[in-house]
Amino acid sequence: MSEEKIAEKEAPREAPPASPHGSVEPAWKVSARSARSVFFAALASLAATIAAAALTGHVQSLWPLFVVGAIATLILFVLAFARSLVALARMARADEPVGYAAPLQTIGVGLMAAFGLFLALMGTFGMARGRQLRKRGKVLLPPLVPGGDWARLTMEGEIPEDVRAAVAARWRENGRTEHASVAAFARLTLDLMALGAPPELVESANRDARDEIRHTDLCFSLAKTIDGRDEGPGPFPEAQSARTLLSNRTLALAELAVDSLIDGALHEGLSARILSHLVRRCEVPAVRSLLHELATDEARHSVHGWDAVAWCLEEGGAPVAHALRGAVAGLPEHPGTDLPPAARDGAWEAFGIHSVELEEEQHRNALASLTARVETMIRREPVFR
Ligand SMILES: [Fe+2]
Ligand SMILES: [Fe+2]
């Protein structure tokens, strides 16, 4: 071997990069951080691909978007896996003690983010209207049966005859979701009590359940006013089979945080935003005052959803924060709509039923403010400072 080559081999290696605090950072830490970033990018790409897949169902020409998203997601996951292997190899060769905490922490962050993303996908499956009961992601609703037990209010209102039956049917559909929300808040009370939540949160959940009873009455009474039919929610045994929290406390806190973020903060907040716009567009006085009442209540429910998220974060710390970040990455860009085709262009806004455009616009706004708020909440936690 020539002298130059020996000198080259013996020359000191390039120093590892300095950390933002000025100290030299071990190579394994740089690799672990890079693996984590790529993993989060893969999660975001997966969420975008799922949104593209949902859109492809409506607009078939968008299928190339889905294919590109799927390929990008696959590449990013492979890259994240490869970088994790590099990080592990560097940990094994590190001169300084690595300890078990660091690699476990890296794996834990990824797992909690994946858990949050999974919960977000399950929680945004189908339509989005307030707190709902779900079983394996499917929203549970009561059946409609003859009888006017849940239409106890007297109202007045005229709707043109050609759309009367369809608009009344839509208000009954809204009534079914309000009725199911009563059970969803009962579920929330059980969850909060199981985790030892403060009395203010339990009190809010019970007050909100009473609001939903009133909303159910309002919706079914309005439907009866419109078409004169006595129909309401029937026995709802499925309410007892809705999902329950996991037994591990940290995972249960993450589950409740993500549920409250999606159903409480996002969906209740989105309902409040849509309803407050509809108040100005509605032309039937009785419906307008109903919309105003619903908008006020749903906005309060959304605030209570944020309160639950904040408590879970405070109680669960970093794992809950990572689950929330994963959940935000998994939120769809478009709301799952179940609007009847005749209402989609806004023709029924005069009767208190929104358009696809209003739903899309408000979903965009709600999502942007939610993303920023979650990040602010997480950064405020001492563990992330
Ligand atoms: Fe409601
Ligand atoms: Fe609500």
Image (cartoon, rainbow, N blue to C red):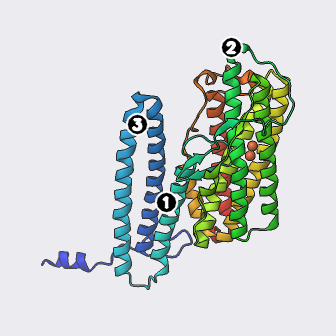
**Ligand 2 lies under 8 Å from the Cβ of mark 3:** no
Disc 1 residue type (three-letter): Ala
Residue that mark 1 sits on:
114
User: Which element is circle 2 on?
Assistant: helix
Q: Name the quadrant containing residue 16.
A: bottom left
Label of residue 218 in the image: none
User: Which element is circle 3 on?
Assistant: helix
Q: Residue at x 26, y 80 (%)?
A: 10
Is residue 334 visible to us here? yes
Label of residue 162 in the image: 2
Q: Nearer the viewer, mark 2 or mark 3?
A: 2
Distance between the alpha carbons at the discs numbered 3 and 1 = 23 Å
Q: Residue at x 36, y 40 (%)?
A: 67
Q: Nearer the viewer, mark 2 or mark 1?
A: 2
Distance between the alpha carbons at the discs numbered 2 and 1 = 49 Å
Disc 2 residue type (three-letter): Asp
Q: Name the quadrant containing residue 7.
A: bottom left
